[in-house]
Image (tube, rainbow, N blue to C red):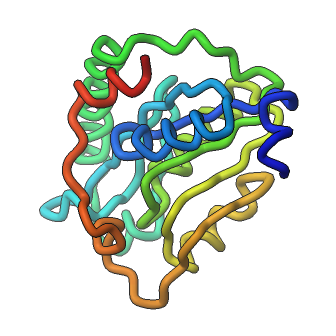
Amino acid sequence: MKLSSCKESGYLLVAIPRGGVVVGKAISDMLGIPLTFVLTRKIGAPGQSELAIGAVASGGIIVRDEKLISDLSVSEKYINKEIKKEKKVIAERLKKYGKSTVSLRGKRAILVDDGIATGATVKAAIGYLREQGAGKVVLAVPVAPKDTIAELKPLVDKIVVLNTPDDFSSVGQFYRYFPQVTDEEVVSLLK
């Protein structure tokens, strides 16, 4: 994929807020293609909110890690409660960010985040893009573990990842400066 051909070929940049919008804005500006977003929320394990047992995306897309759910003996009651909570957060953020007016139907979507750990939110985002009729999905991220990339490969048409380190504990460890991105920053970048 040549950078100069992206604008003419119906590509658009789809970022996962919040951190993905920072990365997405830079790429969108460089390629000269439209920037939009897909909202996703991690479903955290009981007592371990950073450990994703699944994810929810705009449009009601739900992804579950059935093996991890079973290994941790997570109840359906807990999962349903968390899904409801995360759908509410997505609805609130949609009000803040505004609804995207960009149609994905037949477009070539470049899905971007600031990095991937378990892949749950990215899987939910890919599900959303496919449901919305994206013609091609390219996943582009700065960093992700090798095993997660292997899981995601069959779900997309192409993956571009800059770093697949052997020693991976979190996305933030690969940034010199990794502040929490605010909703206000996301809104500003999406304008």
Q: Please, which residue is most extreme toward the bottom here?
A: 166
Give the x, y percent position of residue 87.
Answer: 33, 28
Q: Is residue 19 above or below residue 101?
A: below
In-front residue for pair 148/32: 32
Identify the residue at horizontal 75%, vertical 31% (top origin).
134
The quarter of the picture where residue 71 lies is bottom left
Q: Quadrant of the C terminus?
A: top left
Could you say where residue 61 lies in the image, as x and y percent from the top left? 52, 34
User: Is residue 62 toward the left or the right of residue 98 in the image?
Assistant: right
Which quadrant of the structure image shows residue 11? top right
| Residue 90 as seen in the image, left or right of residue 77 | right
Q: Residue at x 59, y 35 (%)?
A: 28
Which image quadrant is residue 150 in? bottom right
Comparing 114 with 50, the one in front is: 114
Is 103 situated above or below 50? above
Q: Is residue 63 above or below residue 29?
A: below
Q: Is residue 44 left or right of residue 35?
A: left
Give me the residue at 49% from left, 60% from top.
Answer: 119
Residue at (73, 52) in percent of width and height: 156
Tell how many labels: 0
Image: 153 above or below 168: above
